[in-house]
Amino acid sequence: MRALIAVDKFKGTLTAAEVTDHLRPVLESAGVTVDATPLADGGDGTLEAAQAAGFSLRAAEVTGPLGGTVSARWALRGTRAIIEMAEASGLALLQCQGGSVEPATARNATSMGTGELIGHAVAAGARSIVLGLGGSANTDGGIGMLMGLGAVVHDARGQRVHDPRGALAHAATVDLSTPLRLLDGVELTVACDVDNPLTGPRGAAAVFGPQKGADAQAVEDLDSQLREFAHKLGDADTAARAGAGAAGGTGFAALLLGARMESGADLILDLTGFDAALAQADVVITGEGRFDVQTLSGKGPAVVIERAQRADLPVFVVCGSADSEVSHAGLARLLQLTDKAPVEQAMSDPGPVLTAVADDLAEAVLSFRYRR
């Protein structure tokens, strides 16, 4: 019996690698051969997945979401680079820079460091760049990223805008000639698992702005500024495309630069050789901290389940907890940490609870073999 583990992180408690490390020895002690491939969707954990696939990690000093500098990691293998936007422009960096999640930071947070990271990758010889969108602090339409790549922005008085913080509100013209020249001959792929347009009720400000501190007025103002930004660039069609609203509108800016949008989870699974491992497996094990409707709308575990079912392999899901409204149809078994311990214990000390769940998982995997 050979099992393939491809789990996502249990957010706030265990990394994907730690989840695997708790499951593997229990399964192996029960006589199950275990293979594992890292799972990520372009957000947190993408660089770790890249490293497991043979990429080397690098670091660069870039502009943080509130200005100043932060040290951001990125990955390189040959001429292919992986950039995780949250490393340079992430919401988690706000506190590190002395900020907080509030309307002022929602208005001013910038994506400039992400553009600078792309520039570092190009300077290092990258000709193919995967940009993972997720966990960003900005709702700037990606104007900061464009400035980080050399775009020249002027305000209504003809004065050049140098400060990327709040630049969206002041931009009257944006010259993209330098970013386009820099990326000439470079394949830019955006790993994105949301389909939101740039503006409107499903746009970047309305849907994701409140998570970044935007109150009702800030959401209204940012949505208006994003719409005006797209109008000034003469690209309403691009603004309406699925994914343009990702990462505070950074998806829109990436599309302006000729980027191709792809499912983040599919990209990472292809990168890590998931299908080759799948071809050797008898069963597949996936999961994440919370298994819910959002999980099944294109996140990593959903893609794993889809590929495994296409290969006619049974799928076992291990999670912290599951939404009772989510269908378990097609799954061999769903196992929750909260079936073994109260939520508080599963969150504060998940390791022993996960090991106990792994015992049940091993028994279920082996009994499934006997049924087959």
Image (cartoon, rainbow, N blue to C red):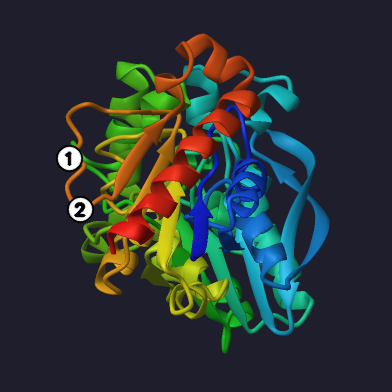
Q: Would you call the spot at circle 1 few (<14 residues within 10 Å), some (14-19), or many (20 or more)?
A: few
Where is 322 relative to 363, above or below?
above
Left or right of 307 in this view: 155:
right
Residue 83, quarter of picture: bottom right
Along the line of sight, the residue nearer the viewer: 357 or 157: 357
Q: Position of residue 240 (x, y in %)?
A: 21, 57
Q: Residue at x 55, y 25 (%)?
A: 105
Q: Which mark is residue 230?
A: none
Circle 1: residue type: Ser
Quadrant containing the C terminus in the rendered view: bottom left
Q: Residue at x 48, y 40 (%)?
A: 170
Secondary structure category for the residue under label 2: loop
- Residue labelled with disc 1: 327
For the residues bearing labels 1 and 2, Cβ distance under 8 angstroms: yes
Q: Residue furthest front?
A: 370
Circle 2: residue type: Gly
Examine the rendering and report whether any part of residue 162 can be seen: no
Examine the rendering and report whether any part of residue 316 can be seen: yes
Q: Would you call the spot at circle 2 few (<14 residues within 10 Å), some (14-19), or many (20 or more)?
A: few
Q: Position of residue 230 (x, y in %)?
A: 31, 55
Q: Position of residue 331 (x, y in %)?
A: 26, 50
Q: Position of residue 10 (x, y in %)?
A: 53, 35
- Judged by depth in the image, the label closer to the viewer, 1 or 2, is 2
Along the line of sight, the residue nearer the viewer: 12 or 119: 12
Residue 54, quarter of picture: bottom right
- Residue labelled with disc 2: 330
Left or right of 219 in this view: 142:
right
Residue 262, quarter of picture: bottom left
Q: State the separation of the CA atoms marked 1 and 2.
A: 9 Å
Where is 336 relative to 116, above or below?
above
Along the line of sight, the residue nearer the viewer: 310 or 57: 310
